[in-house]
Image (spheres, grey):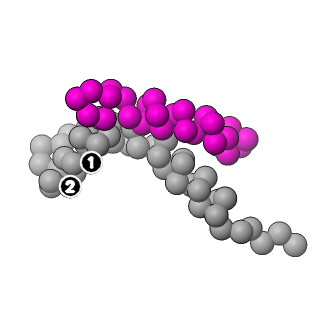
Amino acid sequence: MELLNNWRIILLLCLTLGLAPFFPEPHIWGKLKWIAGGAVGMQAADWFDVLLHGFPFILLLRLLIIKLIPSKKN
């Protein structure tokens, strides 16, 4: 569980796996534009690719929510 709460590892994942390949644009950005355009022609492999490249950002969002919302410890 410590691995999922490590800022450094999650940021490294976002900058590497989340944005790779970097040129001509980050892969996740191209996929998100494709989905915003109606996802016409997307196949199962494309959806898996979105999940794979988006997962580090989901972890980052989870970590931000955990850190910003105070926990109720008695």
In the rendered structure, find residue 36 and report the number of the disc placed on it.
Answer: 2
- How far from the left and from the top, in percent, is residue 9? 61, 34
Dot 2 amino acid type:
Ala
Residue 71 lies, with reference to residue 11, above or below; the image says below
Number of marks in picture? 2
- Amino acid at circle 1: Leu
- Magenta span of residues: 1-27
Let me know if residue 43 is in the magenta part: no
| Residue 34 % position (x, y) | 19, 47
- Examine the rendering and report whether any part of residue 45 can be seen: no
Q: Secondary structure at mark 1?
A: helix
Q: Quadrant of the N terminus?
A: top right
Q: Say few, some or many: other residues with alpha carbon within 10 Å of mark 2 (under 14 / 14 to 19 / 20 or more).
A: few
Rendered residue at 65%/59% (across/down)? 66
- On residue 60, the disc is none
Point out the residue furthest to the right here. 74
Q: Secondary structure at mark 2?
A: helix
Q: Quadrant of residue 69?
A: bottom right
Q: Is residue 54 at all visible to an observer of this figure? A: yes
Q: Residues within 10 Å of mark 1 (few under 14, many from 20)?
A: few
> Residue, x 18% and y 43% (percent of image)?
42
Residue 2 among those drawn in magenta: yes
Q: Position of residue 68 (x, y in %)?
A: 64, 64
Q: Residue pushed farthest left? A: 40
Quadrant where the image shows the C terminus? bottom right
**Label number found at residue 32:** 1
Residue 65 or residue 44, whichever sits in front: 65
Left or right: 11 with respect to 34? right
